[in-house]
């Protein structure tokens, strides 16, 4: 796998930047061989007052560039029934094994 080089594609809310800038930078970094991307749920870090990438951005880059998960991570994702044999995300519902720990009647 080589040297893992990661990045958090982000900007503070007072900077002259927007989502288009982040999308461009994300695409260029991934095309250049970025090995991991830091994502924040919802792409909005309210504590630090900045915008970042979210988990769906990694899915976009992987699909666009034909990238695959690291083999160890892909094995774990498959074991947890998160991806199918082709590496695509599985659809989930309340019956998914990972959601079995939720209290009965909890919404997903």
Image: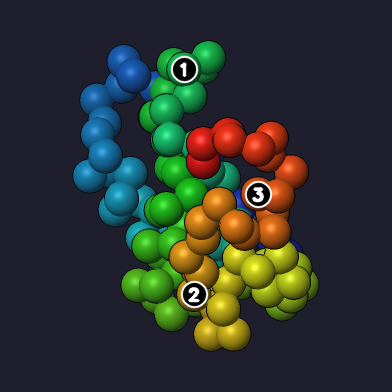
Disc 2 to disc 3: CB gap under 8 Å: no
Marked residue nearer the N-terminal end (2 or 3): 2
User: 32 or 98, which is in the foreground?
Assistant: 98
For residue 7, above or below residue 92: above
Q: Secondary structure at mark 3?
A: helix
User: 22 or 64, which is in the foreground?
Assistant: 64
Q: Nearer the viewer, mark 3 or mark 1?
A: 3
Query: Percent from the top left, x then y, of residue 12?
Result: 39, 22
Residue 88's tag is: 2
Q: Which residue is mark 3?
A: 99
Image quarter hosting the N terminus? bottom right
**Are there few (<14), some (14-19), or many (20+) residues within 10 Å of tag 3?**
few
The picture quadrant where one finds residue 104 is top right
Residue at the location (24% across, 34% down)? 18
CA gap between label 1 and label 2 equals 30 Å
Residue 46's tag is: 1
Query: Percent from the top left, x then y, of residue 86?
Result: 53, 85
The picture quadrant where one finds residue 101 is top right
Q: Is residue 70 left or right of residue 43?
A: right
Q: Secondary structure at mark 1?
A: loop
Marked residue nearer the N-terminal end (1 or 2): 1
């Amino acid at each position: 796998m080589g040297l893992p080089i990661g990045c958090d594609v982000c900007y503070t809310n007072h900077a002259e930047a927007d989502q288009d800038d982040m999308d461009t930078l994300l695409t260029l970094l991934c095309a250049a061989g970025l090995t991991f991307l830091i994502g924040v749920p919802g792409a909005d870090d309210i504590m630090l007052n900045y915008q970042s990438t979210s988990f769906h951005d990694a899915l976009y880059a992987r699909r666009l560039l034909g990238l695959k998960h690291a083999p160890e991570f892909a094995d774990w994702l498959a074991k947890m029934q998160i991806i199918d044999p082709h590496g695509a995300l599985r659809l989930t519902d309340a019956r998914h094994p990972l959601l079995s720990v939720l209290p009965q009647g909890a919404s997903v």
